[in-house]
Amino acid sequence: MGHKLDVALEPGETLIGNIATEFPSHDYKRLMGFRSFRDFQGRNISAELPGWPPSTKAGEPPARTSVKGILLTSAWFGLNSLAILLSLVGLSTATLPAPEDPDELNDFPVLRADPGTFATGAPWQLDPGRNKARPRVILHVTNRRLLFTDPKSGSLLWEFGHKDIKAMTAGAVMRVTFVDGSWVRIRLVTDKDALIPEREENYQVVTVKGEPKRIPLSSEPTYMFITLLKEFLAEAPAASG
C-alpha cells in the first residue's frame, strides 16, 4: 500500500507515511461547503495566486452586505435565538455550536497569505473547485519534510520542513502557520491506499476472557495518520523567543 513518491530523498531522510489531502470546506451552517483565500487584510486573492487556474466553484461565502448574505445571517441568528428559547423550557435543537473564531461565522479562509509569502506556494491541486481528480494531492511525511505530490505521477508540487514552520496543529484538518505569518488549512482524506506504519499509540490492550488482547483504537486512516504528524512535530526544534 501507499502512494508513489517520485522525489529523491536527502541522505538520511526516510519516508514514514502518506495519505490523500485537499483544502477543507466549512461544515457549519451558512458557510457549509465554502472556503476562501485571503491576504492579511482579508481581501479575496483566489484569482491572484501564482499559477492557479480559474476556479469552477470558487466557494466564496456570500457577502454580508448582499441580500443572500443578509438572509442567511438572519437565519443563523434566528435559529440560535430559537435554540436559546427552547433551552429555557428544557428542550433542544440539533443546531451545531458556533465556531470558536467569531470571524468564521462569516468566512472560512483555508489560505491566508500576502504576495511572496510561503503559503502562496500551496498547489492549486489541493482546491476542490479547481481539481476534480480523486485523490487530489498526496501528503508524504518524512523525518525531515512534508512533501505534497501529484497522485498520478508522484512528482513534487510543494514541500516544507521544520525550519519553515512557526506552528502546526496535527489533526484531521491541519493548520500550518509559516515563519512569515502566512498559513494554510489542509484536510486529511479517508484513503484506502494510505501508507501508515504500525504505531503503538494507535492500539490499546484490553482483557478478554482473562487474556490481554491488543486492539486498534480506530480503523480510520486519518486518525492513525495524525500520530505520524505528531511524531514529525516532536522532531522540530523548540521555537526561540
Image (cartoon, rainbow, N blue to C red):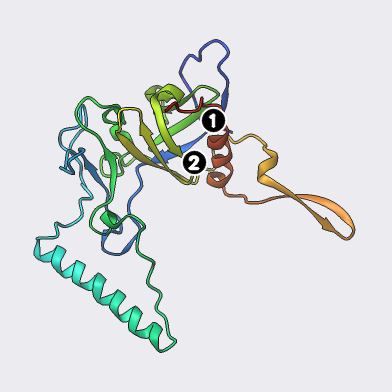
Q: Amino acid at mark 2?
A: Ala
Coordinates of residue 87 in the picture (x, y in percent): 40, 83
Coordinates of residue 230 in the picture (x, y in percent): 55, 37
Disc 1 from disc 2: Cα separation: 9 Å
The residue tagged with tag 2: helix, strand or loop?
loop
Residue on which disc 2 sits: 170
Crowd rating for badge 1 (residues with CA inside 10 Å; few <14, some 14–19, many 20+): many
Is any part of residue 135 visible from this angle? no
Crowd rating for badge 2 (residues with CA inside 10 Å; few <14, some 14–19, many 20+): some
The residue tagged with tag 1: helix, strand or loop?
helix
- Numbered badge on residue 182: none
- Which quadrant is home to the N terminus? top right
* Marks 1,2: beta carbons within 8 A: yes
Residue on which disc 1 sits: 232
Residue at 22% across, 24% down: 116
Residue at 23% across, 57% down: 106
- Location of residue 161 with respect to 218 vertically, above or below: above
Coordinates of residue 202 in the picture (x, y in percent): 66, 44
Q: Nearer the viewer, residue 175 or 67?
A: 175
Q: Which residue extends farthest right?
A: 210
